[in-house]
Image: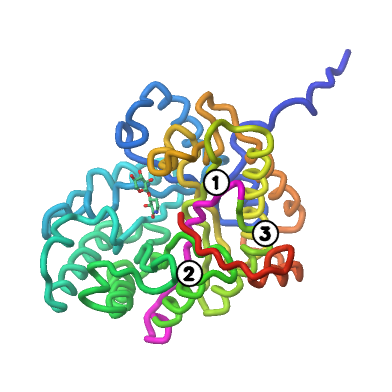
Amino acid sequence: MRLLPLVAALPLASGQLNKWAQKAGLKYYGSATDTPGFRERQPYAAAYAKYDAIFANNDEFGQTTPTNGQKWMFIEPEPGVFNFTEGDVVADLAKQQGKLLRCHALVWHSQLAPWVENTTWTPEELKAVIKRHIFGVASYYKGRCYAWDVVNEALDEDGTYRKSVFYKVLGEEYLKLAFQWAAEADPTAKLYYNDYGIERPASNKTAGAKRLVKMILDAGVRVDGVGMQAHLHADNHPTMADHMNTMQQYAALGVSELAFTELDVRIKTPGVNDTKLAWQADSYAAVAEACVRVPQCVGITIWDFYDPFSWIPAVFPDNHAAGLWFEDFTKHPAYDAIINVFKKFDNRKEIGDKPKPADDCKEGKGKDAKGKARRRSWRY
Ligand code: XIL
């Protein structure tokens, strides 16, 4: 019998990301997903069957986050009137498919119901509004959320507090109260502070995130995790050492978990080419390896895996192709780059038995390769 030399040339079998991530010691590799027929997904109904089949495979994605459905404007559109229809679409899917659910997001200035912003509140009134929202939503999903993004994006680009309605009326007290109420409403969910641009070790915003989390912990209120959204840029992305250094700074505050919560790596238009895709692969691989190497990092969520469903071109028209699957359902080179990272750790680890951080994480303390301090502050 003739053996065909096919095996080496075959693409990786389908359904790999979560499987290899777990073998490397992470709890999950996941993808956010939105309500069918809504927003970015709306013009692409013809792609649903293929998309759904990839999403449903738990060897590919072991976790999900509703991209939009649990946000304030959809879930409490009028004062005290809750509508869980959209949030339930993804929560139910997670349950049916046995995926971990990260819930997103309780207190956020964006996609907020207009009535919250358009009213002039006294501090006591706004506290009651936030409390009703958190108890209304977190109690409804009680026991179903592995984690909650309790407060999202409370920092400005320079690391100071964002002047949201919550901050303007209540100052930093709203942060402590939000975590305290979330802990009361759903005692078993891991409670995260989540933000973008907090992935670099020496940025003002990273310093701001540390200050914010420390302030809440010092008040005796529980914060379990820091979520790094990681909306990254292929042409200028953090290295693995950057990610490790940053995560170690957060871990040193005493939080028990870290996660990459909204990972995507955008490419500048026009087009894609091998160079840009290689930068992108490096960026995805750096996140994967840093997460494996830092004991507190539990998992990675990509902010949808299929390029046409990504928010990036809709919000940043000069960028695209930020996910792992192209429009024709072929995969970006980053996919194999991620798998190859996880495979390096396969024989070393069991779930929950992560290697100790390596010494190579000591680089990157705010200096780039040429030793210059990094000053740029990062937007999405
Ligand atoms: C984005 C969604 O993906 C879009 O569909 C929506 O139009 C805008 O919000 N930070 C967050 C996410 O915390 O909730 C955002 O999601 C992306 C940036």
Which class describes the residues within 10 Å of circle 3: few (<14), some (14-19), or many (20+)? Answer: many
> Which residue matches tag 2?
205
Queried whether the magenta region covers residue 224, the answer comes back as yes
Asked if residue 110 shows in the view, the reply is yes
Between 276 and 341, the one lying in front of the other is 276
Give percent across and percent down for residue 122: 12, 76
N-terminal of the pair, mark 2 or mark 1, is: 2
Specify how the rendered protein is coloured: rainbow
> Which residue matches tag 3?
240
Q: Which residues are magenta?
A: 216-235
Q: In the rendered view, would you say 107 is above or below 380?
A: below
Tell me the element at label 3.
Answer: helix
For the residues labelled 2 and 1, the Cα–Cα distance comes to 19 Å
Please state which amino acid type lies under the numbered disc 2. Answer: Lys
For the residues labelled 1 and 3, the Cα–Cα distance comes to 14 Å
Give percent across and percent down for residue 316: 42, 43
> Which residue matches tag 1?
265
Queried whether the magenta region covers residue 22, the answer comes back as no
Please state which amino acid type lies under the numbered disc 3. Answer: Met
Between 202 and 77, the one lying in front of the other is 202
Which class describes the residues within 10 Å of circle 1: few (<14), some (14-19), or many (20+)? Answer: many
Between 275 and 115, the one lying in front of the other is 275
Q: Can you tell which quarter of the image residue 135 is in?
A: bottom left
Give percent across and percent down for residue 305: 50, 39
Please state which amino acid type lies under the numbered disc 1. Answer: Val
- Disc 3 under 8 Å from ligand 1? The reply is no
